Amino acid sequence: MMECLRVLELYSGIGGMHYALKESGVAGKVVAAVDVNTTANEIYRRNFPDTPLWPKTIEGITLDEFNKLAFDVILMSPPCQPFTRIGLRGDIADPRTKSFLYILDLLPRLAVLPRFILLENVKGFETSSARESLLQTLKNCGYTFQEIMLSPTSLGIPNSRLRYFLIAKAAPGRFSFRTSPEILQSFPWASERNTSDLNTASHTSCPNTCRQEEEVEEDMERGSVLYKLETAQDAERKSYQNSDQSVQQIQDFLEPRMKGEAEEEMASYLLTPKTLLRYALLMDIVTPACRRSVCFTKGYGHYVEGTGSVLQSCVETEMESVFKALDQLSEEEKLQQLVRLKLRYFTPREIANLMGFPQSFTFPDQISIKQRYRVLGNSLNVRVVARLLQLLLS
């Protein structure tokens, strides 16, 4: 059995990596979590009160301080904005990449190289100069590594969140699967010894699925994820996703039906009349029976277009019939039709469920709904990372 690993969690956010470590079942202790986001740090402290949390910039940590931590593992999810179309893809010229480049400069100079590294970032990182610097640094330090593009749908979770991952082992470590210089589009097969553990209740994604999600992500970055203005290809993709029996239904991740005050609270998530009239044709709408939803971003609940799916909570009303009738109606009549669908935002708890956070994960009361959406949109899928940690650390 492997000894308890000392883990350094950089860009710790609300603790997605920490939860993934716990879910992986690998013996590990987070010896320090580092993040400058005060809201995220409040949430992290609530859920991991015993973990040392450093509310400082990574560049402000000296080589000596890093060496004193004597960590075996680095888990990190550097800022993604330099690599997205919305973020203008400034790459290494973007000031937000500075801390990551500092880590790459520091790594070869550590007294002892960490034995394991896991990095997560957005689609777009794989074509960046930052990624080239990362790979060159790992090669110079003698690491064996594998790059993978993965989404929660590969584990049967009905949410598209295509992300770049890299897992690395220091020499003389080797993986239980054959590594490839190409970026994999699904979980690599583990050795026969580990396959049963790693694939229990999991689903194998395919390049076709990743390609579909890549198109969705690109559409979202352009703000063009559409419902009624969708192309035939969009409709076909959604139909394909909803017919995939290996993926769970949305209803498995929703908060239970509630009565009284709790029911009134749920009503507060209904889309306003103004939002319905302005954005009805642009929304990605799902029902509880659907097996798909688009990626939730930090703007969810504040912006409608391209930030995540909305839920049709009145399933007795046929969505297609409502939208087909809109062209011939006045604004008031349109609103009467749209209200019948009872379209609402997913709650922060429901998004946390889709992202694999356990029920024990909670927000401090003072964190607003908008702040909750924002930090979740900046986080990662816990279950996907947990599987990668099993591959990396077992």
Image (cartoon, rainbow, N blue to C red):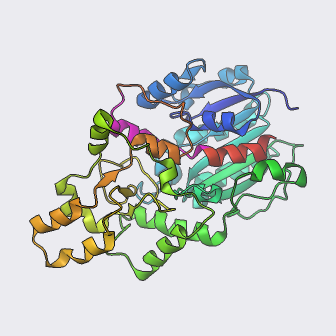
Q: Residue at x 53, y 65 (%)?
A: 213
Q: Which residues are magenta?
A: 367-382
Instruction: State how many labels appear.
Output: 0
- Asked whether, in this view, residue 295 is left or right of residue 99, the answer is left
Occupied quadrant, residue 124: bottom right
| Extreme-bottom residue of the structure | 232
Residue 391: x percent and y percent?
77, 47
Is residue 151 part of the magenta span, yes or no?
Answer: no
Which residue occupies the foreground of this view, 66 or 360? 360
Residue 386: x percent and y percent?
68, 43
Which residue occupies the foreground of this view, 185 or 142? 185
Residue 144 vs 280, above or below: the answer is above
Location of the N terminus by quadrant is: top right
Which residue occupies the foreground of this view, 268 or 220? 268
Residue 132 vs 116, above or below: the answer is below
Dominant SS of magenta comes to helix
Q: Residue at x 62, y 72 (%)?
A: 208
